[in-house]
Amino acid sequence: MLTLIRPDYNAICIEGARIVAELVRKKPDCILGFATGSSPLGLYQELIRMHQEEGLDFSKVTTFNLDEYVGLPPGHDQSYHFFMWENLFKHINVNPGYVHLPAGMADDVEEHCEWYDKRIDEVGGLDLQILGIGSNGHIAFNEPGSSLGSRTRVKTLTEKTRQDNARFFESIDQVPKYAITMGIGTIMDARKLILLASGKNKAQAIKNTLEGPISAMVPATIVQMHRHATLLIDEDAAGMLTADWRVD
Ligand code: F6R
């Protein structure tokens, strides 16, 4: 696990985009795993800049997203489908046929979750998965208590996560109660992980992730076991670390 502490949010996004771009250049038909939320937004902006100014080519890339709310149609402005198209896909030359997000409106959600994991395997597995981290230590929507070996499935969102995400909805009542999420085992199968954390509200979760024991109660701690995980953290998110994780 490589931990990179950088001065601010912008710096972690630039570094993260550099890692993604290097992979896309080396393996144009790579399989990328994307996340939503505020953490990866700056990284996506940098990828868009690289596409527009440097011709970074996404035409052969296949994508899978971590999660999606159950019950929100793809056109809903708070669905993760909508988020990904608005914030990344429509600005780059990704092939829409190669884009995968869990279907929050699937008739048979369980069957769909099984299909999603199978589809990842069929195309050769995730080369790189981008992650954010919840203030409670969740990754994707694997909330505290999630099995560390779990596969893609439906999870009930905790009150904490619903409160954290309420800022995007008119009221907390409108925040969905369930989501489809890649499992922790599914995420750990990715050949590389990048976890981005920025801001003081992530400092406790980052301390637990780096310095705590591996525990299902802090799902992000599992990244300690990954062979190629890079943690990109800004000074605020690193503020509670006791060990010196600084790498130049
Ligand atoms: C989003 C996701 C979530 C977020 C996490 C942090 O696809 O899987 O785990 O990464 O909730 O959210 P932000 O980045 O908004 O602080």
Image (spheres, rainbow, N blue to C red):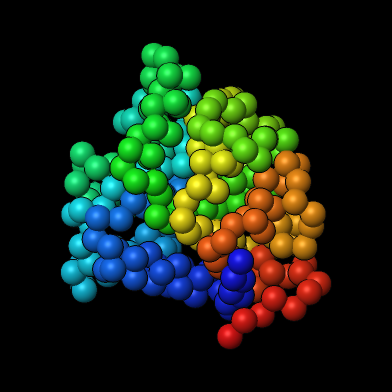
Left or right: 153, with 53 as reference point: right
Quarter of image, res 198: bottom right
Residue name at image x 34 percent, y 46 percent: 124
Name above or below for residue 166 compared with residue 6: above
Quadrant location of the N terminus?
bottom right
Left or right: 176, with 26 as reference point: right
Q: Is residue 233 visible?
A: no
Residue name at image x 66 percent, y 51 percent: 222
Relative depth, front residue between 207 and 215: 215
Residue name at image x 39 percent, y 46 percent: 125
Percent from the top left, x then y, of residue 84? 35, 45
Residue name at image x 58 percent, y 85 percent: 248
Quarter of image, res 91: bottom left
Q: How many marks?
A: 0
Name above or below for residue 243 compared with residue 193: below
Q: Is residue 208 visible?
A: yes
Name above or below for residue 90 compared with residue 22: above
Percent from the top left, x then y, of residue 38? 50, 53
Relative depth, front residue between 83 and 193: 193
Residue placed furthest toward the top:
107
Percent from the top left, x then y, of residue 220? 65, 50
Left or right: 40, with 32 as reference point: right
